[in-house]
Image (tube, rainbow, N blue to C red):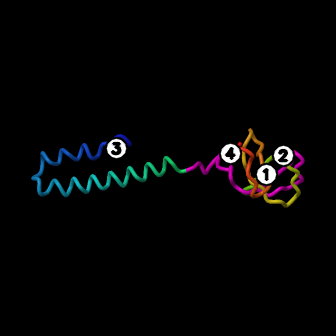
Amino acid sequence: MCHIILIMPILGIAIFWILPMSIALPIYLIILTLSILIYNSLLHAMHTPVTTGIQGLIGHKATVLDSINPEGHVKIHGEIWNAVSSNVLRRGEKVDIVGVEGLTLRVQNEGLKTSSGKHC
């Protein structure tokens, strides 16, 4: 199915052999316009960041359930996760999730940046 969508403009050229130019040209322009719109939406979908699974948690906010020094627990989206942090974090604080290691989230104080500026 995907391959047919990608070659729609090429398949549309066959219209010129079947119909007169005055009818085939507007039909082909419609096919070409639809193809461009579909290609645009496909490219947008391919470049959308991950929003599900473990990688979808990075960048979200969580709430500290018990003090983290350096390990503890946080709550995000109604789920309780193990968490580690290089800073001491107190119960009730909001934290940013900056990385995932197995089933443990790496968190830091809300608004702080990692030293490298990248997610762990």
Identity, as a three-letter code, of the amino acid under mark 1: Gln
Estimate the spatial distance between the alpha carbons at disc 1 and disc 2, rounded to whole Å: 7 Å
Q: Do tag 1 and tag 2 residues touch (Cβ < 8 Å)?
A: yes
Quarter of the image with the C terminus is top right
Estimate the spatial distance between the alpha carbons at disc 3 and disc 4, rounded to whole Å: 36 Å
Please indicate whether residue 57 sits to the left or right of residue 37 in the image. right
The residue sitting at 36% across, 55% down in the picture is 37
Q: Name the residue under label 2.
A: 86
Q: Residues within 10 Å of mark 1 (few under 14, many from 20)?
A: many
Identity, as a three-letter code, of the amino acid under mark 2: Ser
Please indicate whether residue 93 sits to the left or right of residue 60 in the image. right
Q: Do tag 1 and tag 4 residues touch (Cβ < 8 Å)?
A: no
Secondary element at image label 4: loop
Q: Where is residue 107 in the image (x, y as percent from the top left)?
A: 78, 49
In depth, the one of 118 and 96 nearer the eye is 118
Q: How crowded is mark 3: few (under 14 residues within 10 Å), some or many (20 or more)?
A: some
Q: Mark 3 points at which residue?
A: 6
Please indicate whether residue 22 sits to the left or right of residue 54 in the image. left
Q: Do tag 3 and tag 4 residues touch (Cβ < 8 Å)?
A: no
Q: Name the residue under label 1.
A: 108
Q: Mark 4 points at which residue?
A: 118
Q: Magenta region: which residues?
A: 49-75
Asked where in the image residue 62 lies, by quadrant, the reply is: bottom right
Question: Going by the picture, which residue comes out furthest to the top?
Answer: 102
